[in-house]
Image (tube, rainbow, N blue to C red):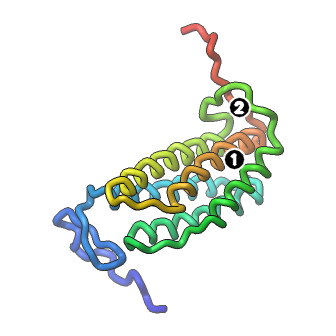
Amino acid sequence: MGNRLSKIITRTGDEGTTGLGDGSRLPKDSARIEAIGTVDELNSAIGLLRSLPDLPPPVSKLLLRVQHDLFDLGGELAVPGYSVLTEAHVTALEDAVEEFNAQLPPLKEFILPGGSEAAARCHLARTVARRAERRCWTLANAENTRGVALIYLNRLSDTLFVLARRLARHEGGVEVLWDRSRLD
């Protein structure tokens, strides 16, 4: 395979449009481009989390797989009608949630984001995953399409929530529970 990105500055987007993988162009503020950008932002948030030096290897391995999945999802969004993610991708996340959640105490209160640096970064990625899901639903509703990607993003935010709980404990931090009786 040759150099796919040999020219970085193309000036083709200077008028407010961007190109899709099929050669078509869309306004940069279209629902599709917004979805692509938010999935890319999510991948970057997970990359920031993965940059921490002391992540448990099973967590790092899962997050790397997720980053590849998100890159594939970006490709799906960039080529209308193209799909890569399958039910197996969703099942893999569900299995990971079950595995990691089994190691955690039952949850009896809401958790505030934080607890440790890794957990806080994971919570941030979780919120971006929720936004990516919303942006993809906006696109799906506008173009009357549905797909595994929407389910995948929903499961990914659940996965990131459970991983944040796991990471808070890994770093010796504690989960910050919402206190409904606090005084202002």
User: Which residue corresponds to the image point at 40% horizontal and 61% vertical from the top-left?
Assistant: 145
Q: Which label's residue is closer to the chain start, 1 or 2?
A: 1
Position in image of residue 56 (x %, y %): 76, 54
Q: How many marks?
A: 2
In this picture, residue 142 sits left or right of residue 41:
left
Q: Amino acid at mark 2?
A: Glu
Q: Nearer the viewer, residue 45 or 147?
A: 147
Task: From the image, tell me which residue sits under label 1.
Answer: 163
Q: Is residue 136 visible?
A: yes
Q: Secondary structure at mark 1?
A: helix
Position in image of residue 12 (x %, y %): 22, 73
Quarter of the rendering occupied by the C terminus: top right
In this picture, residue 177 sits left or right of residue 123:
right
Relative vertical location of residue 170 with respect to residue 35 in this rendering, above or below: above
Relative vertical location of residue 144 with respect to residue 19 in this rendering, above or below: above
| Quarter residue 89 falls in | bottom right
Relative vertical location of residue 94 with respect to residue 179 in this rendering, above or below: below
Q: Residues within 10 Å of mark 2 (few under 14, many from 20)?
A: many
User: Which residue corresponds to the image point at 45% horizontal and 91% vertical from the top-left?
Assistant: 2
Marks 1 and 2 sit apart, C-alpha to C-alpha, by 12 Å
* Residue at the farthest top position: 183
Q: Amino acid at mark 1?
A: Leu
In this picture, residue 32 sits left or right of residue 106:
left
Q: Nearer the viewer, residue 102 or 47?
A: 102
Position in image of residue 29 (x %, y %): 26, 56
Q: Nearer the viewer, residue 43 or 162?
A: 162
User: Which residue corresponds to the image point at 80% horizontal and 39% vertical from the top-left?
Assistant: 104
Are dots 1 and 2 in contact, CB under 8 Å? no
User: Which residue corresponds to the image point at 33% horizontal and 81% vertical from the top-left?
Assistant: 7
Q: Residue 175, which numbered label?
A: 2
Q: Residues within 10 Å of mark 1 (few under 14, many from 20)?
A: many
